[in-house]
Image (cartoon, helix red, strand yellow):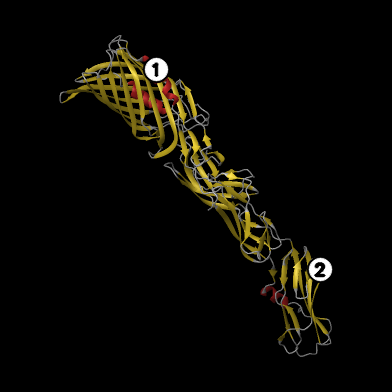
Amino acid sequence: MKLISLFLFLLSFSFAPAQWLKEKGKGYYKLDTWSLLANKHFTDIGGVDPNATRGLFISSFFAHYGLSEKVNIIAYVPFFVKNYQFSQISETRKDRVYEPRHEFNSLGDINIATEIKIAPLGNWAFSTTLLFGLPTGKSVGGFDGSYQTGDGEFNQQLQFNFGKSYRLGKQPFYLKTYLGFNNRSGGFSDEVHSFIESGTQLKNRSLLVLTRLHWIKPLYNGTLDASNSDGAIFANNIQSLSLGGELAYNFGKHWGLSVALTRPLYGRVIYKGTSYSGGLFLNF
Amino acid sequence: MKPPFFFVLCLVLLIPSCSGVDYIDDYVSPTVRITTPVKSLTIGTSFQFEASYFNNIGELTKDVNFQWESSDTEIIEIDSQGRVFPKKQGFARIIVKLISEERIEISDQIEFEVENNIIFVTEEMTEEEESTPPPLDTASSTMMIATVTPTLEIANRILQITVATEHSFEIEYTDENGILANPSNISWESSDPNIISIDENGRLRAEATGSASITVSTLVSNTLISYSNFITVVEPVAVSTITSYSGSIQTKSSYALEGGFTLSIREGQLVLSLDKDYKASSSLPGLYVYLSNNRNTTSQAYEIAKVTVFQGAHEYILPSNIGLMDYQYILYWCKPFNVKVGEAVIYN
C-alpha cells in the first residue's frame, strides 16, 4: 500500500538532525511503531469521503550507518505490518454483524538506500541518496485482497538532499530538504517528492523538536486503475501534502525515545487520518 | 540510564491489537409493499396480489400475516390471502396492512382500473351496416303496407365480450306512427345459451368462448319484428402490469457517477440497463452495483456485479427469481471501504 511508502520517507530522513551523514563506523538505529487509523479518505478529485475504519500498524527497524565519511547506508525494515478493518455492526440491531473484523499481517516493503556526500556549497551541505523499494510485502492480502502490506513493485528513488544551520535569535536551528524522483515499476505512475524539515534542540540539547512537510506529486504516467481483479487497492496516482512533527528525548548518552505524528493536509487517493509513531533510538 | 527495552518491545509488538467497531446507521422505517405492479384488471379474472414486509433495517421478513382490504367491494373483492375478484367496472384500491415489530400499523395500497372489456358497436360501424340490408327482420310481409314500418333495434350493441362479463342491452322501438315507444311484449333469445345466456330483461352473461347471436323480438299487430346482435366471446384479457421503471443514478460521494437507467422485465427476465450517458470514476477501488431496500447498507442487498464498465450503455441480466418491485434502490458501493458512492431510486 502506498501509505506505507509515504511514511517510509518520512521516517528515513528524520533521525539525524543537523548531521547530514554519519561518520565512519557510527550509526543511528531505531525500533519504531507507527499507527494510522482512518475513517475518511481523499478521493481522486481531492474531496473527502467516508470509509469503513481501516488501520495500518507497522513495527519497524531503521538503521543509518556510516561506511565512510562520504558514504552511508540506510535500511528500513518493516518486519511486522498489520492491515486491518473494524468490524461493522448494525446500529439498529446490535446483534447483526455485517462484517467481522478483518486483518492481514506480514512483512512490509523493505527500503535500502545509500547516501553519498557531495562537496558543500557555502553554508549548505549536499548529499545524494539512491533508494530502492523492495516488494517484500504482500500486494494482495486479506479475504478480499485489499489488505495488502506492500505495493508489489520495485521502485528506485534518486534524491538530492540539502541542509544548513541557521539561528532565530540565539536559538540554533537546522533545515534540511530534498527533492526526489521516484521511478516506479509495475504500471505505477512515477512521482516527484519534495521534503522540508526544520528543528532545534532544547533542554541542554537533550530534547529535539522538529516539524516537517512532505509533498508527493504523481506524474500520471502509469497504467494501473485503483484496483485489480484480485481486489488489491493499488492506490496509484496518490498525491499528498503532509505535515508532521516529532519530539525526541535523549535519556542517555546513546539512547532516547521519540514520538511523532503526521497528518495529510491535502491529498488524492489516500487516507485522511493522523498517524502516530513512537520508538526507541540508539546512537553509537 | 539503560534503555527500557522491555517496555519498547511491548510497544512495538503488542499495540497492534487495536480493535474497534463501526456502527452502521442502517435504520429505515419498516414498510409493507405490494410487489405486484398491476395497472388494470378485467372482470372475470382473478389475480393473486403479493406483498413483502421489510423490517427496520430493510430486511425482507417472511411468514408475516397481511390483512387485505378493498376500497370498494362492489368493484372488487379480495380474500384474506390477497386474491382479488373484479366485479364491476371502475377504479378501486387494494390495501394491505400489517402490524410491524415496533407495534405500528403500516400499510400500502395500489389503485387500478377494473375494465369491463366489452367492445361496443360504434357509430362508424353502424353507418357501414346501414349501407347493407337493414337489420329489421320481418317474419311476415303482411304488415309492409303500413305507411311507417315499426322498427326494433338494440341501442348498445356489442361486438365482443369476455367470459364472465355481464351486459344489459337497451332497445329502441319505433311504432307505426314513427314514435319511440315501449313495446309490451319483448323477448330475448340466445342462439347458444352455453356461450351467452340472457335473461328476460336483456341482461346477458358471457359464459364461454365462442360466438352467438342475441335476438330481441316483439309482436306488433300479429307481426313479429326482431333484431339480432352477433357477439364473439373471448377469454379475459391478461392482467395489465407495469413492466419497467426508469430513473437516474446520482453520485453520493466525491467520485463521478451519473447516468440514466431502466429496470425492466424482458422475456421474463429482469434486466438493468444503463443508458449511454452513464459514466463512473475508475479511480474507486472495488466498485460494485447492488439492488437494495436500505440505501445505507448493502447487508440485505443483492450484489449484481463488480463494475467493469465505466462509461456508456451496458446492461446486467438478473436472475429470474428477482421481481421488478423486490428492491427499491440501486446502489453503487465501494466494497473495500464499505461506503456508498451513488444511488438511484427505482420507484417511490
Is label 1 on the same chain as label 2? yes
Q: Residue furthest front?
A: B103
**In the image: residue B80, left or right of residue B24:** right
Q: Residues within 10 Å of mark 2 (few under 14, many from 20)?
A: some
Look at the numbered discs 1 and 2 and tell me whether their residues touch, using CB distance below 8 Å.
no
Circle 1 — which element? helix
Residue sitting at 81 percent across and 68 percent down?
B193
**Residue that mark 1 sits on:** B9
* Residue B201, visible in the rendered structure: yes
Amino acid type assigned to the residue bearing label 1 in the image: Leu
**In the image: residue A255, left or right of residue B163:** left
Query: Residue B184 appears at what percent x and percent y?
Result: 77, 84
Amino acid type assigned to the residue bearing label 2 in the image: Pro
**Residue that mark 2 sits on:** B193
Query: Residue B44 appears at what percent x and percent y?
Result: 71, 62
Q: Is residue A244 above or below residue B40?
A: above
